[in-house]
Image (cartoon, rainbow, N blue to C red):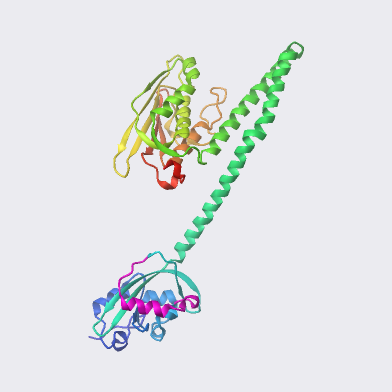
């Protein structure tokens, strides 16, 4: 049967291929159709067969390949000693898979280096050993990895800048604000009679603005610190941070006349201080957006929803408050996003954004269900066990 010449890589003469043995059609078809470069060489390193992908990858024609040794595909800086490695492989031939923990490079026609992964497979055609080199150009992957490293370094710089902001917000911004509020309060105490109604109104506005600014700085500081390592992750009964959050909110709960119910909660590997902040924000949110004339009821419940791969826990904070239209279910977690005016409900619009950031730091997700006038349910899903990359502090593993 007459063979048809491959337009991408001319067929090789059988005599040059495997020491006079014809290449079997099935083997030839496998090699020529492989989606990565394949090069067959003999014990002396002479190349005896290549496929079209290798021709594209290295830039040599099929005929040029037959005049090369395998060392010619290695960058000059790595060629010294390569023949010894080749001979060692033939003395103890054993398949070597790709990704064997080595950084490898090849050399295109013209001398350009590029990163590769190579798998070696010994072949025995009866009259001598050969080796099949399967080669993948990983230039794009390496570029993506380098870009990821650059992004990680950029993220580290951003976190450092956030730490700097936290320091400024905790002192340099709050200290002058405290002085403004203090001087305003002194003026009210010492000069209230002389100020008149308009003066007292102006001072009252100034003091209230100072209080609002203080809350805003405090919440921005809390938001900026979420991504920084705090107490680290540990196995935690989630009832503990709920109890602490309720203790912090005790006065608010009493003033609202709220009824709080806490069901049995599971354990999870979590940052205790951030879990406390999460529940404090969610419960505080439920108390803030209560319906007038209705006794506020807040229920905290949870359970395990997935048992495989370490499992996941589900937590719900349910209330009977004013609720919201679910078309805004994503927007409520955006920083500074408010569905109600400041005159209706106090707040900075940061609390739920902090919740989302805390949950995401724990490799979890948070969402909400609600109907206007029928309350809201905030749902948090967390892994029971954190991945090691989330917190590298050995004291907390």
Task: Determine if residue 8 is in view.
Answer: no
Q: Nearer the viewer, residue 385 or 62?
A: 385
The residue located at (54%, 38%) in the rendering is 225
What residue do we see at 24% from left, 76% from top? 26
Residue stretch rendered in magenta on the structure: 74-98
Whole-percent x and y of residue 13? 31, 87
Seen in the picture, residue 300 relative to 232 is either above or below; the reply is above
Image quadrant containing the N terminus = bottom left
Asked if residue 83 is among those painted magenta in the image, a careful observer would answer: yes
Q: What x and y, as percent, mark residue 370?
A: 40, 29
Task: Tell me if I can see residue 90 in this picture.
Answer: yes
| Above/below status of 220 relative to 127 | above
Foreground residue among 188 and 226: 226
Where is 244 relative to 306, above or below?
A: above
Q: As drawn, which residue projects farthest toward the front? A: 395
Q: Could you say where residue 371 lies in the image, as x and y percent from the top left?
A: 40, 27
In the image, farthest residue toward the right: 194
104 in the magenta segment: no
**Residue 293 percent location from the top left of the image:** 45, 14
Q: Is residue 3 left or right of residue 180?
A: left
Relative to 50, 190 lies left or right = right
* Tally of marks: 0
């Amino acid at each position: 049967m007459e063979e048809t010449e491959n337009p991408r890589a001319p067929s090789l003469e059988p005599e040059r291929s495997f020491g006079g043995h014809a290449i079997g059609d099935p083997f030839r078809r496998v090699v020529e159709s492989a989606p990565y470069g394949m090069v067959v060489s003999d014990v002396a390193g002479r190349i005896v067969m290549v496929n079209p992908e290798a021709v594209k990858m290295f830039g040599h024609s099929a005929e040029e390949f037959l005049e090369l040794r395998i060392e010619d595909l290695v960058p000059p800086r790595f060629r010294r000693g390569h023949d010894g490695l080749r001979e060692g492989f033939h003395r103890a031939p054993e398949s070597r898979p790709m990704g064997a923990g080595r950084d490898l490079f090849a050399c295109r026609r013209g001398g350009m280096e590029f990163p590769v992964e190579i798998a070696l497979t010994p072949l025995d055609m009866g009259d001598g050993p050969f080796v099949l080199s399967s080669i993948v150009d990983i230039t794009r992957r390496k570029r993506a990895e380098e870009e990821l490293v650059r992004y990680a370094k950029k993220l580290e710089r951003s976190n450092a800048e956030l730490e700097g902001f936290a320091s400024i917000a905790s002192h340099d911004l709050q200290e002058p604000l405290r002085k403004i509020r203090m001087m305003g309060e002194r003026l009210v105490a010492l000069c209230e009679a002389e100020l008149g109604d308009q003066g007292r109104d102006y001072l009252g506005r100034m003091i209230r603005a100072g209080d609002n600014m203080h809350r805003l700085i405090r919440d921005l500081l809390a938001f900026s610190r979420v991504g920084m390592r705090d107490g680290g992750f540990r196995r935690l009964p989630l009832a503990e941070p709920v109890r602490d959050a309720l203790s912090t909110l005790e006065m608010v709960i009493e003033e609202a006349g709220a009824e709080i119910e806490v069901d049995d909660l599971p354990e999870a590997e979590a940052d205790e201080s951030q879990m406390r902040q999460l529940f404090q924000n969610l419960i505080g949110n439920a108390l803030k957006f209560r319906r007038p004339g209705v006794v506020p009821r807040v229920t905290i419940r949870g359970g395990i929803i997935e048992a495989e791969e370490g499992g996941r826990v589900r937590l719900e904070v349910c209330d009977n408050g004013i609720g919201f239209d679910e078309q805004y279910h994503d927007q409520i977690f955006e920083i500074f996003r408010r569905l109600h005016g400041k005159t209706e409900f106090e707040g900075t619009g940061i609390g739920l954004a902090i919740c989302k950031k805390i949950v995401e730091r724990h490799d979890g997700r948070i969402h909400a269900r609600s109907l206007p006038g029928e309350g809201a349910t905030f749902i948090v899903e967390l892994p029971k066990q954190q991945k090691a990359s989330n917190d590298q502090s050995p004291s907390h593993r």
